Amino acid sequence: MAISSIEIGGISLSAVKENRSDKGKYKISIEENDYTVIDIETTGLDPNYDEIIELGAIQYQDNKEVCRFQSLVKPTEEIPEFIEELTGVTNEMVAEAPTLESILPQFLGFVGKNLLLGHNINFDINFIYDCALNLELPPFSNDYMDTMFMSRRLFKGEKTHKLSAVCLNLNIPQPEEHRALADCIRTHLCYQAMKQYCINEGVSFSILQNGWKAQAKNITAQTDVFNEDGPVYQKVFVFTGTLDKMTRKEAMQAVVDCGGIISDNVTKKTNYLVLGNNDYCKSIREGKSNKQKKAEKLQLEGLDIETISEDVFYDMLQDSFGPEV
């Protein structure tokens, strides 16, 4: 099912999100030995309003570390207190750091055309892609793998698949800090542990690739086969505010058509709170809605919930519909 053929409520998804044919492809594999792990820290989840404050990458060849890249990045606006607490990156730490304009070309040169590995890497890929585009740099077109999606496929009974939870499940030591390089190391160890798990348990590569049927809730899905490796599958979405390019009903339909779940209120089961673009912009500068405050409170408590903008939501739809199912 090609992304250009997807229509939601009579609206082509390509019409609401520009064609990204030069973006890399998602790869499902438990057999890779050469790859580069990446992770970024940001002031938020939308590159239209938020900024990268740290870049990290580690290259592995034959499963062994070869070299690493790390840099803090000085944003144009102050880092919000909530982000300081969440990431461990403070305004004082980035005061003398290079700007994104000067450091991103170095980061892109470091990763080259390598196969990338990350945890919930769709976020990193899309954020870096947009930043490179805004800076008129070459497209960020690396193919990539995601340990979060692999964990969801291998350990279906787990309630959450955020990095700390996967590490706990795989008995991987947890670092004290939530920083880019620390997360790169943990992601590499998770990938290696999952590879070993597949060997020990006799899990075949074909099991990781197959799609299957699932039930949608609240709104009836228009398909009964979903791409489980898409970022929307089995995730709980809540919407607030007015979306620019879709009605609320169309957005909810899109979620269930990707195998996701819709809810009207932010709860401990919520994975994503989607803010209309206008509300997102307003919330950053003029205070936060009750739903956003509740989402941030739950996030600081360690729950698997994120607040995203409308544009990030479309990225997730595209990544869910993009692979063949």
Image (spheres, rainbow, N blue to C red):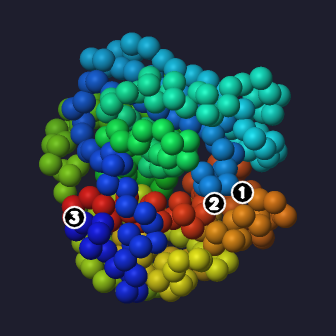
Mark toward the viewer: 1 or 2: 2
Residue where numbered disc 2 is placed: 307
Identify the mark nearer the N-term, 2 or 3: 2
Question: Crowdedness of circle 1 by 10 Å Cα count: few (<14), some, many (20+)?
Answer: some
Q: Which element carries disc 2, helix, strand or loop?
A: strand
- Within 10 Å of disc 2 (Cα), the crowding (few <14, some 14-19, many 20+) is many
Say which label, 1 or 3, has the lower sequence index: 1
Kindly identify which numbered label has been placed on residue 325: 3
Circle 3: residue type = Val
Q: Given contact means CB atoms under 8 Å apart, are the residues at marks 1 and 3 in contact?
A: no
Toward the front, the furthest residue is 136
Q: Determine the CA span between mark 1 and mark 3.
A: 34 Å
x 17%, y 43%: residue: 205
- Pointers 1 and 2 in contact (CB under 8 A)? yes
Residue 299 spot, x, y in % from top left: 67, 53
Label 1 to label 2: alpha-carbon separation = 8 Å
Of residues 272 and 254, which is closer to you in this image?
254
The Cα–Cα distance between marks 2 and 3, rounded to whole angstroms, is 28 Å
- Against 315, is 57 above or below? above
**Residue 302 visible within the image:** yes
SS class, disc 1 = helix
Corner quadrant of residue 55: top right
Residue at numbered disc 1: 296
- Amino acid under disc 2: Thr
Quarter of the image for the C terminus: give it.
bottom left
Say which of 139 and 67 sits in front: 139
Q: Nearer the viewer, mark 1 or mark 3?
A: 3
